Image (cartoon, grey):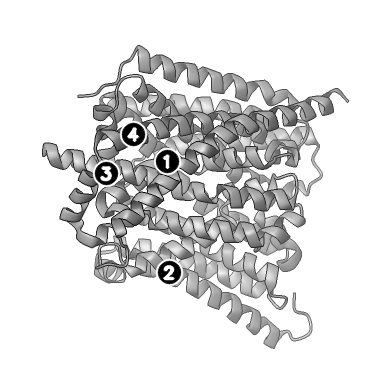
Amino acid sequence: MSNFNWFLDGSIILIYIIGTLLAGIMVRKMIRGVDDYLLAGRKVDIYLGIASLAATEFGIVTCMANAELGYKYGFAGTTPGVTLFIAMFIIGKTGFCIKPLRDRGVITIPEFFESKFGKNVRWASGVVIVLGGLLNMGVFLRMGGDFLTNVFGLPPGYLEVMMTIILLIVAIYTILGGMLSVLVTDYMQFVVMSAGLLFATILIFFKFDWSSLVAHLSDHYGRAAFNPFEGNAYGIDRIILDIFVAVASILTWQTMITRVLAAKDTRTGQKIYQATSPFFLVRFIVPAFLGIGAFYYFSQTGQLPEKEILALPSFLTIVLPTGILGILIAGMLAADMSTNSSYMLAWSSVIYNDIMEPIHKRKWSEKKAIFTNRVLVASIGLFLLVYGLWYPLKGDLWVYLQVTATIYLSSMTTILIAACYWDRANNWGAIGAIIVGCFIPISFLIMQEIDSTKDLANTIGPYKSAVAAYVLTGIAMVVGTLLKESLHPIKTN
Amino acid sequence: MLITFWLIVFSLTIIWYLVVTILVAWKGFGSLRTMLNEFKNNEQE
């Protein structure tokens, strides 16, 4: 039985959507060039940077997936948040890779690679980033739609229509205002999202007392619910992969690194990372706690949901009162809209700046360049609609996300570290890293689909194969570089 | 011991989130206004 009230909760949501749309559209006239459109003229300071980075990296998908981790593993399920928090703080503090990247004043990571490895590596990197990024993002709308349909208590047939409307709203302000609109709306979205999440978490904390929740976890999962190293529930393979993914995504995930590149100077970029790092713990602990609450509640009522990933929306609509539910849904919508807008802009920036560079050669007028970027954002929106909504995902979501992220993260991280700190690194090593980084995860996905190799793929498992991709990509970088040095000892690049 | 550890982590996380939300809502608004004014001035030049 849902507590959602169309008049009260619906009004809160409607006011929020209209406000966001107006704010996003109002700033469109201030855009004068590509730098303004893609990086807001590099004027981002620390507070705006925190709001934007936090709002972008917290979407409905994140919330549902992390609640599922809490539901299935207890507090051990927050391990990825712990690794992300530590990695982001250390990288922000030391400036590891991000300092040379921001100092160079580039728009994207592949642009940074060009000076060291040449145009081909820049182009190939752009392709890999867009491939991995778009495939990864392709499932966001579907999961967001599932969440909203569930909390509104609508029949599944409304999913497509509702998410299409949301995507259209996001696309309109992103197409018109670019990064400037994204920043303005991210700020609003951060405030609304945080208010909704904090309200819901504090309310549930007092509604179901802490000792009952942890006692229930202890009864079902034992000590493994509080310690990921205990037993095989979470597993050491997964912890190692969490560490690799944390470091790689903080260094190279385009939507994260864009905040460093858009910062007004390198020091501010580093401070944004340091100050936002605890949010990556929040990003896991808050949804995991809600997932733990859902596990407790449904175990007591004996109505455990068929799909664990849908436990959160069902739980929230039952336990949260009208009004608070409206604030939370507006918050979740905020989270989803900020994620989609930033992601659309991030991938379009790579397509324009790196993949299309051989076409425009930076000679197009600002007007033509902005128009092209707007067309790219619209095309990505269209792709998301077709891929995410009209083609429902087949197979395991977790494996899918791992594979698509690894295609991009493993090679880009290796190449970035080599570009910053290994003088001898050359384009053979970089190309080798890109090939290996793509080959391993895609092979794993194909092996899972073929009957004769399915068992082998299951024996290896998604975590070991993804870890292997990171390690072998590093080896490919070294081997490729040394091979070129031995065959072409004089001309190294 | 582990349960106490998670209670402390959870409480600190919520307190941090609450403080940062208020701080960012307050200071971020000023930052946003300054940034938009800069863009507006550039537009008029």
Q: Do labels 3 and 1 share a chain?
A: yes
Q: Which of marks 3 and 1 is in front?
A: 3
> Which of these two is toward me, A28 or A93?
A93
Say which residue appears at 15% left-offset and 42% top-offset: A299
Q: How many marks?
A: 4
Inter-mark Cα distance, 4 to 1: 11 Å
Say which residue appears at 19% left-offset and 38% top-offset: A297
What residue is shown with label 1?
Answer: A140
What residue is shown with label 4?
Answer: A147
What residue is shown with label 3?
Answer: A210
* Circles 4 and 3 in contact, beta carbons < 8 Å: no
Secondary element at image label 2: helix
Q: Quadrant of residue A323?
A: top left
Q: Are marks 4 and 3 on the same chain?
A: yes
* Circles 4 and 1 in contact, beta carbons < 8 Å: no
Q: Are marks 2 and 3 on the same chain?
A: yes
Say which residue appears at 62% left-offset and 74% top-offset: A429
Secondary element at image label 3: helix
Residue A5, above or below A493: above
Secondary element at image label 1: helix
What residue is shown with label 2?
Answer: A467
Inter-mark Cα distance, 2 to 3: 36 Å
| Rendered image: mark on residue A320 | none
Q: Is residue A433 left or right of residue B13?
A: right
* Circles 2 and 3 in contact, beta carbons < 8 Å: no
* Amino acid type, residue under disc 2 in the picture: Val
